[in-house]
Amino acid sequence: MTDHASVLLEPFLRLAAEVRPRTFWDGTLGLGGHAIALARLLPELRVWGSDADIEMLNRAGAAIASAGLSERFSLAQGNFASDPHGSHAPFDIILLDLGISSLHIDELDRGITFRGDQELDMRLDVSQGEPVWRWLNKAKTEEIMSVLFRYGEESFAPHIARAIVARRETFGELRRNFELREICEEVYRRRVPAAKRHTFRYPAVKTFQALRIFINQELASLEKALEFLPERLNVGGRLFIISFHSLEDRLVKHAFAERTRIIETDPLARRNYREGDYTLVVKKSIVPDKNEIAKNSRARSARMRVLQRLR
Ligand SMILES: C[S@@+](CC[C@H](N)C(=O)[O-])C[C@H]1O[C@@H](n2cnc3c(N)ncnc32)[C@H](O)[C@@H]1O
């Protein structure tokens, strides 16, 4: 098994255990790291786990079985936005640990990573939609540019988009991750003076991130889920969301803030807002400490926000 460390595990376990939960829905089960740890800590806990990726679910199932916890877990494949365990709600704890697992980078051959030679698929659920290479071979320059800008905040989006289309026209279909990586490297080589290159992240990072977010509709799923997840909590229950980039965190922050205060419609009211049915468990987000980042560099950009249902 891949060397796997669950991000922000200690604060998650502490703040989840505080409410003495009996039911838990993990909507991004991954390899089951958070879920298995909480189940071990709380022997009465019943867990519903789901993941968009069937491969992850199978691996998590094996890990749960070898921890001797299968009887307390129910697993289902599904996007969290489609509420796969909705019929078992409400829950005391809900967790979304967004993005991809280390397995997607280190083992699964989906072209999510720019390392090695893989087909550019990038889907988490390979039974839905189309691989990203197919879209890349038919999209217009402006469409590619807009995806790279919106989901990658890539400053060379126009240049990379034009280079993708030019390459397609010269060499035919673009299908492998290393072909895309080469295009990004070439654009950076031309646009960034050698003396400044060390100030940039690796040239393909933002492009790969943007395409993955786009093809999996990651932000749309999160937005949709944020509309109903708070209502899937029991009174006193907590919703934890761990995000890995500012686009996600902004959505979570605003959606949580909206639940904590309600716009006052009474024209005679002395305040513009009154208290909502939810509260923030920590006013700001929780980020990993230096030790965690030293052990797991993927934790670097993680932020966890926690919402609690009051009534
Ligand atoms: C960071 S990993 C979760 C790791 C897990 N918490 C652990 O400790 O092992 C994120 C997981 O969420 C899944 N995922 C991402 N977006 C999803 C979505 N919209 N619906 C369901 N699962 C999703 C990915 O397939 C991946 O397995």
Image (tube, rainbow, N blue to C red):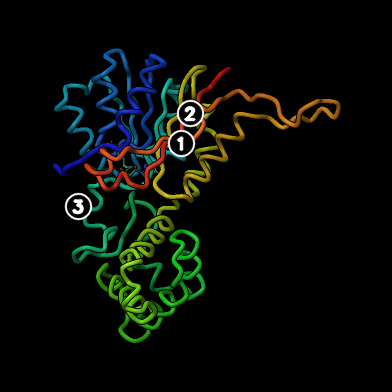
Q: Which mark is residue 282?
A: 2
Q: Are marks 2 and 1 in contact (CB under 8 Å)?
A: yes
How crowded pointer 2 is (Cα within 10 Å; few <14, some 14-19, many 20+) is rated as few
Horizontal side, residue 35 vs residue 281: left or right: left
* Residue that appears at 41% across and 36% down: 304
**Disc 2 versus disc 3: distance between alpha carbons?**
33 Å
Q: Is residue 261 above or below residue 92?
A: below
Locate the N terminus by quadrant.
top left
Q: Are marks 2 and 3 in contact (CB under 8 Å)?
A: no
Q: Which mark is residue 285?
A: 1
Q: Amino acid at mark 1?
A: Ser
User: Type of residue at label 2?
Assistant: Val
Ligand 1 lies in which image quarter? top left
Instruction: Tell me the residue at 21%/22% (across/down).
Output: 69
- Residue 27 lies in quadrant: top left
Q: Is mark 1 within 8 Å of ligand 1?
A: no
Q: Quadrant of residue 130?
A: bottom left
Q: Position of residue 237 (x, y in %)?
A: 47, 20
Q: Is residue 203 above or below residue 57?
A: below
Residue at 38 percent across and 38 percent down: it is 287
Residue under the image location 31 percent in, 71 percent down: 180
Q: Is residue 173 visible?
A: no
Q: Relative to 185, does residue 218 appear above or below in the rendering?
A: above
Give the position of the C terminus as an image quadrant: top right
Q: SS for tag 2?
A: loop
Numbered label attached to residue 106? 3
